[in-house]
Structures are given as structure tokens and as C-alpha cells.
Image (cartoon, helix red, strand yellow):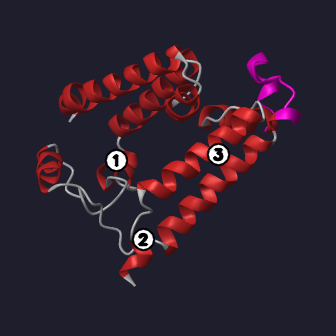
Amino acid sequence: MEALYSPWPWYVSGPLIALTMAVLVLMGKRFGMSSNLETLCSLSGAGKFTDYFRVDIRPRRWNLLVIMGAVLGGFIGANFLSPDDQVAISDHSIEKLNLLGFKSAGEAYLPLELFSAEALSAPLVWGILLMGGFLVGFGARYAGGCTSGHAISGLSDLQLPSLIAVIGFFAGGLVMVHVLFPLIF
């Protein structure tokens, strides 16, 4: 039964990602979650409020399948393919997170200190979540795409701007985790 829960080996999943990207490139399509969410917002009527979302979504309808697949795949993975809710992170990481006040480290994928009903009643948590969401959204648009778009599609196309963006994403993440996050908590 344990084999059911083991991740796919790199030599299976890697070529499947490469095959998917090759098909998308040959079809003239791009992959990236921010583009998919942009299509969803356009479809939902966001164009009534801003010109940015006033686009013809007919050629981008296939993006909605990616969103549905991500939601469905996440649901299936979390509810049927995960042996337990315990997060596989190192004991050292758990200790560091505990020092920052995250007592649920290693036990839950979403820290209860940020995402529980009690935590969401705190203005500081709302401020952090709203500011983080704004920065991620702004960064994805400013960089011309999100991490998945640049790291998977852009690097598959050997685009220098995508390489620069991916380096920036990782550098920003490291600064956040090691410098800013401890200052906040």
C-alpha cells in the first residue's frame, strides 16, 4: 500500500512535463498560472472595471482546463493520494518555525497560525496576506508572468528574460524567508 503514496520518479514526471511543454510550444501556446487566472478574471466580467481584462478570451479558453485540472488534481492529491497530513520537512526547519511561533510546523500544509479562524480575526494577519497577495500579483504582472510561466515555459523556450525573472523570484523568496519573515514574527 505504501507504493501508492510514493511520488513519481523524476524519469517519469520530467519527460511528461517536457512532452507537455513541447506540445504547447508546437501549438503556439504558453503555460503559466497567472495567464490562466487572467483569463478567468476576463471571463468573470472584470473587464467592466478595468480595460486590462477587456480581451477576447476565445483563443485562451484552454487555460480554464489548466485551472480546473489544478483544482481537481489538488483535491484528489490531498484527499485520496496522501497517506497523512504530516508535512515532510526537516526537524531543523520545524525547530526554526517553532521559534518564530509556528507550532503547527510539520503538521499542517497551511500554518494554523496564519490560516485558522482565530488567526484571520487578527488585523496583522490580514495585512500580511493582503500585502503578500498584492506583491505577488504585481510582481507576476511586472515580470510578464508568474513562476510557473517563466520557470517552465520561458526556460523551455530558452528566454533570457525568463532566466532573469526566475533568479529574481528565488532571490526574493530567500530574502523574504531569511530576512523579512523573522522581522515580522
Q: Which residue is mark 2?
A: 82
Say which residue appears at 36% left-offset and 57% top-offset.
109
Where residue 74 appears, as percent x and y from the top left, is 54, 59
Q: Which residue is mark 3?
A: 20
Q: Are marks 1 and 3 in contact (CB under 8 Å)?
A: no
Q: Is residue 18 left or right of residue 107?
A: right
In the picture of the structure, the residue carrying the numbered disc 1 is 114
Pair 2/3: label in front: 3
Marks 1 and 3, how far apart at CA: 35 Å
Q: Is residue 97 above or below residue 88?
A: above
- The image shows residue 73, relative to residue 54, as above or below, that is below
Spot occupied by residue 37 in the image (x, y as percentages of width and height): 66, 37
Dot 3 crowding, Cα within 10 Å, few <14, some 14–19, many 20+: few
Under tag 3, what secondary structure? helix
Measure the alpha-carbon separation of dots 2 and 1. 23 Å
The magenta stretch spans which residues? 44-59
The residue located at (73%, 39%) in the rendering is 40
From the image, which quarter does the N terminus lie in?
Answer: bottom left
Callout 2, which amino acid? Ser
